[in-house]
Amino acid sequence: MTVTILLFANHRELANAASVELELSADANVREAVDRLRSLPGLACLPAEPTVAVNREYASLERDLNPGDEIALIPAVAGG
Amino acid sequence: MTVTILLFANHRELANAASVELELSADANVREAVDRLRSLPGLACLPAEPTVAVNREYASLERDLNPGDEIALIPAVAGG
Amino acid sequence: MSPAVDAGGARVIGRMSEDPIRLDDLLGAGSSADGAVTVFVGRVRDQNRGRPVVRLHYEAYGKMAERELAAILEETVGRWTLSHLEAVHRTGTLELGELSVAIVVAAPHRATAYEASRHVIEEIKRRLPIWKREEYADGEVEWVGPAPSEA
Amino acid sequence: MSPAVDAGGARVIGRMSEDPIRLDDLLGAGSSADGAVTVFVGRVRDQNRGRPVVRLHYEAYGKMAERELAAILEETVGRWTLSHLEAVHRTGTLELGELSVAIVVAAPHRATAYEASRHVIEEIKRRLPIWKREEYADGEVEWVGPAPSEA
């Protein structure tokens, strides 16, 4: 299935992209999508447990994905 | 000595006066001044321990008075 | 009637006012070093404990009120790191909905701005010798004044 | 971009805005039954942790930010008795001193007005997917974003 991953702030700058489309197996969860992202240039150093949202809601890395899901990586940066 | 007692809010209405001048003995304290006020029409029911200020500062009833002191009775009413 | 006190570089203003309080005159407080500004406004309510209020008058022991307000503000800038602290309390006859008190705090951080603002209004309510004469729709009158604790 | 939600009679408005925040548009909130109004304003500071800031840009995950903001406001009116709750957060490039966020709460009593306001800003800082890109005088850049706890 195809999912979209949105990138923001330092992630967006590091990857030089605001979004990425990934092709995943039908039973993939969020963690597998994030692991795939680590192969992208600039994103090798993503934290082991990044904060994520699925379809505009904070979600667990164990959440199962559905085709067309909109995943967002929420960068952990200094608080303001 | 002569002191001035200022009356506010319900005290002022009860006494029908915004201030009262009292002639007191030279060693009088605030409590004696307040006791004298009770003889005025409308002020017989002043509480035993009213809140007072002397010369624009909250003060104890035991505070000794000096000639010309400005005493204020601070009415205890419902809080707002 | 507009004492301005400088305490540790902070701009501190306390006022008793017979004229309406205009928020526009109070905002723009502090400098661009201040990340947080809180404004508290007390307004004349149209009822008190369920009784409709039709008219309202604030009577103050004016000179003591000014003195206490200045003391509250000085204590507050001494306790928190603030760059601007301003408080105005109305006296006289107010219409329903008019502002009775306004407090503006500018501070580098928001925790400070909230805490200092809350402290000032609690101390004002506790210590300022100001009494409110409320006239109700049923013709009765009640005096409301400073109280040790009230929310 | 201006979702207005009615929850238990309260007027609730949450907005993300690319345009400057004007306080005059936010005040006058609530009815004359509301004795207390608090306004919190966050402003762009000219420094962060001692480093002079020269430019600043807010980047948001806009649709999620709107959703989270609406959720925060709904939770807040559900927990406190409020008659008016409004919050606006800026996005885009801001000048030093410009307002980044504003929260207006009108409530019958002041304790409520303070607590609800503080709750909203803490939740905004914790949950809203908005990141601030700070450019410093020395040419360096830092991203600042939502954080579990911050004062």
Image (tube, coloured by chain):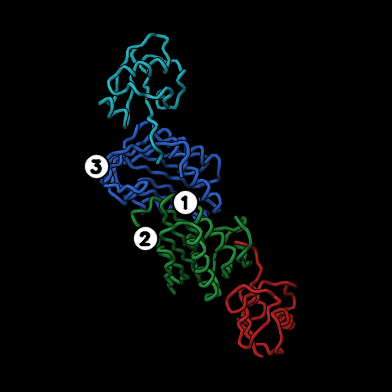
Chain colours: A cyan, B red, C green, D blue
Using the image as rendered, state which of residue C41 and residue B61 is in the foreground: B61
Q: Amino acid at mark 3?
A: Gly
- Label number found at residue C24: 2
- Label number found at residue C28: none
The alpha-carbon separation of the residues under discs 2 and 3 comes to 36 Å
Q: Eyeballing the image, is C87 above or below A61?
A: below
Using the image as rendered, state which of residue C42 and residue C38 is in the foreground: C38
Using the image as rendered, state which of residue A55 and residue C106 is in the foreground: C106
Provide the secondary structure element on which disc 1 rests: loop
Using the image as rendered, state which of residue D116 and residue B44 is in the foreground: D116
Task: Give me the residue at 40% from left, 41% from top.
Answer: A80
Q: Eyeballing the image, is B38 above or below D47?
A: below
Q: Position of residue C17 (x, y in %)?
A: 46, 70
Provide the secondary structure element on which disc 3 rests: loop
Q: Position of residue B63 (x, y in %)?
A: 68, 78
Task: Give me the residue at 62% from left, 72% from top.
Answer: B58
Identify the residue position indicated by label 3 in the image: D139
Identify the chain of the residue marked 1, using the numbered disc in the image.
Answer: D
Dot 3 or dot 1: first in sequence order is 1
Would residue D44 be seen by someone viewing this image from the given angle? Answer: no
Residue A73 location, quadrant: top left
Task: Give me the residue at 28% from left, 45% from top.
Answer: D94
Q: Amino acid at mark 2?
A: Asp
Identify the chain of the residue marked 3, using the numbered disc in the image.
Answer: D
Q: Eyeballing the image, is C94 above or below D88?
A: below
Q: Nearer the viewer, mark 3 or mark 1?
A: 3
The alpha-carbon separation of the residues under discs 2 and 1 comes to 18 Å
Identify the residue position indicated by label 1 in the image: D30
Provide the secondary structure element on which disc 2 rests: helix
Instruction: Judge if badges 3 and 1 mark residues of a common chain.
Output: yes
